[in-house]
Amino acid sequence: MSSYTNASIGSGSRTPRRTVEFGRTYVVRPKGKHQATVVWLHGLGDNGSSWSQLLDNLPLPNIKWICPTAPTRPVTVLGGFPCTAWFDEGELSEDGPNDVEGLDASVSHIANLLSTEPTDVKLGIGGFSMGAACALYSATCFAQGKYGNGSPYPVNLKAIVGLSGWLPGGRSLRSMIEGSHDGARRAASLPILLCHGRGDEVVPYKFGERSSQILSSAGFRYVAFKTYEGLGHYTVPKEMEEVCQWLNARLVA
């Protein structure tokens, strides 16, 4: 059964800024004992509803899924056309500018969704494409103990999944985590599963592969990178089966 709520959040900055309006949040309740909660993030132009239906059919009865919908905003890569997006994105490049304010607002919204879960429940974040980018940015905020704007990150994460995505702002990640004993410990404690198709024409395979390398070199010890030959920018049952097995081992077993 799915339900939804509406939510909006500011950027977390001290200066008054435009409030970011998030869309509907769809919740898939666990069919068995509630052992874990995962926030799952859709891709550019999508919404939480389509993923909630797919996740509802996975054989993971002990996981509660929360599927928020991103704010509608003008997106640079689409020539300023407004659509649902977790942050603004131009052409993908390793040293392209990152919309830290947009990322922080979305990652803060996700953390708020998780912060009200029962204390004995394990927490994770997953996503597809831009949603995967947001999940990986959440992982870096968790490791550093703070958002990009310096505010403390409040949630204890146990698993991250990124499908067909990339790591925003990875250039300075290693130095930030290496300089902090707690950061290195948190990075080493958080397992990450990355999956990418070699035929991806939207987020090229090299971005997924490079993200995996950056995370590993920054001290995330448990990064699994799965390659799918011939897979484009979409998901397939074999990939979701592997996601299920991986999440079951980390969050439910």
Image (tube, rainbow, N blue to C red):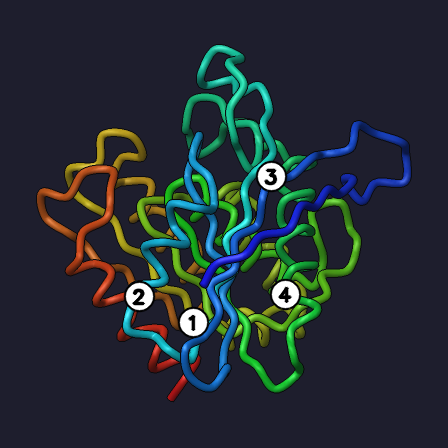
What residue would you read off at disc 2?
224
Q: Which mark is residue 23?
A: 3
Tag 3: amino acid: Gly
Q: Residue at x 46, y 39 (%)?
A: 47
Q: CA distance from mark 2 to mark 4?
A: 24 Å
- Examine the rendering and report whether any part of residue 219 can be seen: no
Is 175 on the left or on the right of 147, as rendered?
left
Q: CA distance from mark 1 to mark 4?
A: 18 Å
- Pointer 2 with pointer 4, Cβ within 8 A: no
Foreground tag (2 vs 4):
4
The vertical placement of 113 against 43, above or below, is below
Helix or strand or loop: what does disc 1 sit on?
Answer: loop
Q: CA distance from mark 3 to mark 1?
A: 29 Å
Is 184 on the left or on the right of 201, as rendered?
right
Between 249 and 20, the one nearer to me in the picture: 20
The vertical placement of 18 against 119, above or below, is above
Foreground tag (2 vs 3):
3
- Pointer 3 with pointer 1, Cβ within 8 A: no
Q: Quadrant of residue 198?
A: top left
Q: Quadrant of residue 24?
A: top right
Disc with the residue nearer the chain's start (1 vs 2): 1
Q: Residue at x 36, y 62 (%)?
A: 56
Helix or strand or loop: what does disc 2 sit on?
Answer: strand
10 Å neighbourhood of mark 3: few (<14), some, or many (≥20)?
some
10 Å neighbourhood of mark 1: few (<14), some, or many (≥20)?
many
Which residue reaches farthest left?
A: 230
Tag 4: amino acid: Leu
What residue would you read off at disc 4?
114
